[in-house]
Image: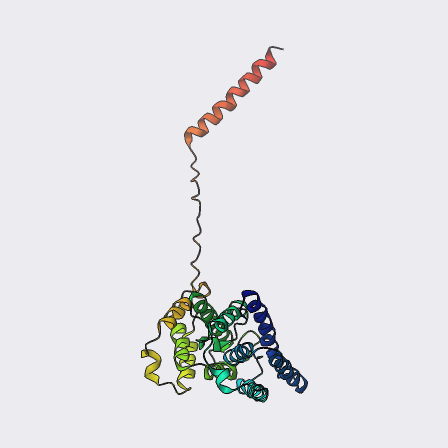
Amino acid sequence: MDTRKKRSLLVEKLSRLHSSMASFNRSDESYDQCLKRLTVFAENSDAESVKVLYRILYALPNIEKETKRETYFSFLENFYSELLQLGFSNDQLEEDLTPNEQEVADLFFNENIGKNLKLVEYLNSAFFTESQKTSLGKSRILIDLIKRCKTSYDPDTDKLNKDDLGISHEEFEDALKSLEESKRILIYRAARGIDDEYMDRGLLSFIRSGIVNTQVDDSEVDSKIMSDEEKVIEKLVIGDKFFQPIHSQQTFIRPSRSVETSFEGIFWAFALLAFAAVIMFLINNTK
């Protein structure tokens, strides 16, 4: 992991392992295969690589729609037990990242975050080096979450209806529970700033109630001071072109020319016709 090439190769392996996590809960066989795949990697890799893998899996749960996060973290506890049996310690797995490990984590972010916009936990993450790119990645995840809520929201029932392109009420609650309090508030603040044309006020009230129901103080939702990064994310979401009103295109109508019947024009028309008739008469008489 001491050269750029080695770090890039490690990121490829970590990306494949992270991607494979989406299938762990499909069956007992998938569960065992996924656990074995992670364990084999741990057996054949250095301690730094295993540490980065474990931290990425913990920070960014890659799960399918029907899988609850508590099921995922239960799986991760089993993997943690396997790591302890292989000789890893809690201190090893939880200590701060070294510069080389941090570079691997940041490379992983560059390769993967943005492709999977369902990773709402990334909003929490201080695991990657903060930059304009990480803020942009977090805003895209937040935009996707709001879009899915908008797709599923039924104003008549004030509920989120299950939809392939949307999000169910249970999934929304599960997502909120996975976020730090300040990031739950960030969801509401960003949604509040979106133009009324795109953000149903009923949906905004629904989001706010959902956040308050996660034991967030009602007054904090509107008054809590956000961090600088959160303010940047909020502005990126509000300013996203998806939420901008489409200005009606101006239709330029070419002014129609007024057709005026001129007596002078009629006179000259008859005069020309008369002149032509005289010419024809003279031609015929000279034959």
Q: How many marks?
A: 0
Q: Please say if 178 is above or below 192.
A: below
Residue 270 visible in the picture? yes
Q: Position of residue 126 (x, y in %)?
A: 43, 75
Quadrant the N terminus occupies = bottom right
Q: Taking 174 as reference, is 243 above or below it?
A: above
Q: Is 222 on the left-hand or right-hand side of 72?
A: left
> Within the image, what quadrant is residue 222 found in?
bottom left
Looking at the picture, how far across and down is residue 205, in whole percent?
40, 79
Query: In the image as oriented, which residue stretches furthest toward the right?
Result: 29
Q: Nearer the viewer, residue 242 or 63?
A: 63
Which residue is found at the position 39% from the left and 79% from the top? 182
Farthest residue, direction front: 2
Q: In this figure, which colouring scheme has been used for the structure? A: rainbow
Where does residue 254 sit, x and y in percent of width and height? 44, 45
Q: Judge by depth and name the residue closer to the eye, 227 or 76.
A: 76
Image quadrant in which you'd find residue 257: top left
Residue 197 in sight from this viewpoint: no
Q: Would you identify the image quadrant in which residue 165 lies?
A: bottom right
Q: Position of residue 153 (x, y in %)?
A: 49, 77
Q: Is residue 24 left or right of residue 192?
A: right
285 vs 230: above or below: above
Decide: is 253 above or below 133: above
Which quarter of the rendering shows the C terminus?
top right
Q: Is residue 161 left or right of residue 260?
A: right
Q: Which residue is at 44% across, 55% downward? A: 249
217, 161: nearer the viewer: 217
